[in-house]
Image: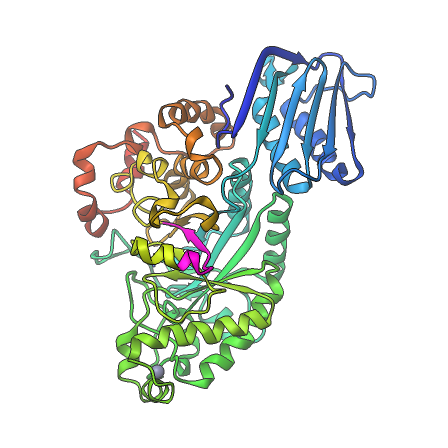
Amino acid sequence: MSDIIPKPNSEQFFGEDIYFDGGVGISACAEAESAAAKLKALLRRVCPSVIFSDNGNVSIKLEKDALLPREGYVVDARASDIVLTASGSEGWTYALVTLERLLKTEGGDKALSLSCPGCHIEDEPRFAYRALMLDEARNFFGETEVKRLLDLMCLYKLNVLHWHLADDQGYRVESDVYPLLTTISSHRNDTQVGGIRSDKFRGLASSGYYTKNQIRNIVEYAKERNIVVVPELEMPSHCSAILAAYPHLSCTGEKTEVPTTFGTLHRSFCPGKQTTYDFLDKLLDEWCELFPSSLFHIGGDETAGSLWKQCPDCRKTIADNGLGGEHELLPLFVNRIAEMLAAKGKLPVIWADRLPRGVRKFVTYTAWLPLDRKAVAAEISSGRLFIVAPYDRYYAGQPYCMIPLKKTYDFEPTSIANGSTDAGFFGVEMPMWTEWVYDRVKLDFNLFPRLCAFAETAWTNAQHKSWHDFKKRWQAQKPTLDSLGVGYAKDKLTDPGAFARNKGAYIWKNIDQYDEVRKNDK
Ligand code: ACM
Ligand code: ZN
């Protein structure tokens, strides 16, 4: 057995090790040449003294089998031959990730000798969409930090960065079309700390945005690691930062500042004005030019319907379209934006707070709140795609006293629908909301080992999962994460026991979210 996370779906070990003492020769089919270059760099990194030689005693071959699934791979290591087979770059990427976990070095820091256990691993992911969502609207981390997370995502075979770049407290994309988004919306005067009910602030202004070149760099860096960057531009609510620069887009036109507090703020674009759609159309063009992903997340959660009720433009739209009330403005808005995006070659995704009627079927739902299981099953059978991201299992921003590690690991994604099979689900996502996370220390603490537990629910078939076995493999991950400088949460904090769990909701609202992190140092 290996200590790989996520656990491969089929692995066999022969009980013999292959030693690379006499040098290693690498050969690759034409399509795998760039994977071969990565393999060479990997071996050098793991064992700086490794000798490359076509006459070496070990050969590593990268071979193609077009019949393997897109992200699937086979590692076959026996006698003196290691063969890494895949149908394309995605599979070779993961074959290399697995190989790196299998390799053993001896000789301490100098890594003088290298070996690989004889084995046969056949692996492919359970779900096609395996995402980390990073909220940089609430707190901005920057290019270096995002690239570090992309490296860690690849290590755990996650393939989507859902990048939340616009919300009430900040807008993070350089704009030539609407320059005030860069100068006004990317800046706020302070940041609330200590929970939603707290009146404490950091006492620091906070700003940041990505230049277009940085975004292109990050998208390219992600692609090299088989990761697609799916951007999120929140609408029609969670958009106060944009309204601070362009107040005419709201129902009242009221001038407001970029908020410094968190929670549901009840500000919104007016879904009853043509100006809103014209503005968003141009803005979406600017984003679509930066993000090649076919998926595009448009938020859609926690909409401020009470504002729409009082707005003459919204009321007129309700009447003109024969809608049953302001709650039907959300499907109307989503459909208009969805059609706009479809015309730009994109597939829209929204957060589904509930299951609104009449939303076009090509709009994918991210399920985060509990939904009616029968209704989800009916949506799936009518062709709707679902991404599963339950707030009480996968939300990485929550303290461990509310979501202990086992609760994340044990979650079965298909349980959100009655009688569903894997085929009905597009995938799963771990959202990292950052209202209460403003530095790398807490980011690492909240994400690790949670992201590992999540990755196993994303990749490994349910029948191959085992909490007991996962815990052992997690212990074996620690030296790797230590060497990468990742400040993961200690075991005593990830499993805080029943007492803390019962106090969860209270803690979320009232207590400084850095409490757990401080305990991690002790
Ligand atoms: C959400 O957590 N408001 C999607
Ligand atoms: Zn309105």
Residue 107 in the image, given as x and y percentages of width and height? 60, 12
Residue sitting nearer the eye, 189 or 260:
260
- Place residue 304 in its image quadrant: bottom left
Residue sitting nearer the eye, 268 or 470:
470
Residue 359 in the image, given as x and y percentages of width and height? 42, 69
Q: Residue at left 23%, top 49%?
A: 508
Residue sitting nearer the eye, 304 or 458:
458
Viewer can see residue 202: no
Residue 104 in the image, given as x and y percentages of width and height? 59, 18
518 in magenta: no
382 in magenta: yes
Question: Position of 61 compared to 163: left or right?
Answer: right
Q: Residue at left 59%, top 48%?
A: 222
Instruction: Work out whether 478 lies above or below 277.
Output: above
Residue sitting nearer the eye, 351 or 381:
381
The magenta region covers 379-389
Question: Position of 462 compared to 57: left or right?
Answer: left
- Place residue 96 in its image quadrant: top right
Locate ligand 2 by image quadrant. Answer: bottom left
Instruction: Work out whether 145 lies above or below 268.
Output: above
Question: Position of 10 compared to 25: left or right?
Answer: left
Residue 386 in the image, given as x and y percentages of width and height? 43, 54
How many numbered marks, from 0 up?
0
Viewer can see residue 324: yes
Quadrant location of the C terminus in the rendered image: top left
Q: Residue at left 61%, top 63%?
A: 290
Instruction: Work out whether 119 lies above or below 503.
Output: above
